[in-house]
Image (cartoon, rainbow, N blue to C red):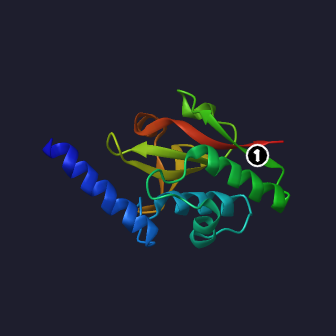
Amino acid sequence: MVFAAAFIVLAGLSAAAYVWGLRLPRERPPVRKAALAAALRLLGVPATEADLSVALRPTPYTGTNEHLLALELDRRLAAAGVGRRARLTLLPGDLQRLDSFPVVATRGLSALVNHWIVLGAPEPDGIRVYDPISGVTTVPYDRLARLLNPVAIRFVSE
């Protein structure tokens, strides 16, 4: 009974905050938008975190799902005439088999939190990783394969 009452109060406060325009950001810092902007810039498409925030219109409860992200990326790629499309795909078990870059991937930090990164070009000792928080580094293939979630956004030729 107490739990139900507490839930109703929290839901009411959350709904009131939404109506009044008070929203807590789902991501601190906005790593998802930073990773997407970095991937677009690697493909030669101008993008900033600010214009992606406006275009993606995340909700305070669900954020923006990966399908909507891929649709927005497709729209921008088509407008820029890059000749690629964004596709949600499974990463291969062997990352050395990746054939198109950049790849927007997530690294699971916990059961509820994903950290967004961009996989750049392959190098002899690993893959160049563009991390919105820690910067650009090269991570060995075997270590990276253990860290990444299997679903990623890849940019494939049309």
Query: Which residue corresponds to the image point at 61% horizontal and 65% vertical from the top-left?
Result: 52
For disc 1, the neighbor class at 10 Å (few under 14, some 14 to 19, many from 20) is some
Instruction: Name which residue lies at 82% across and 55% down.
Output: 78
Task: State the quadrant of the N terminus.
Answer: top left
- Kindly identify the residue that appears in the image at 45 percent across and 59 percent down: 60
Q: Position of residue 126 (x, y in %)?
A: 51, 43
Count how many numbered circles sit on residues in the image.
1
Residue 102 appears in view: no
Classify residue 3 by image quadrant: top left
Q: Amino acid at mark 1?
A: Arg
The x and y percentages for residue 63 are 49, 54
Q: Which residue is mark 1?
A: 85
Please tell me whether residue 65 is drawn above or below residue 21 in the rendered image. above
The C terminus, quarter of image: top right
The spot of residue 59 in percent (x, y) is 50, 58
> Quick one: 37 or 57, which is closer to the camera?
57
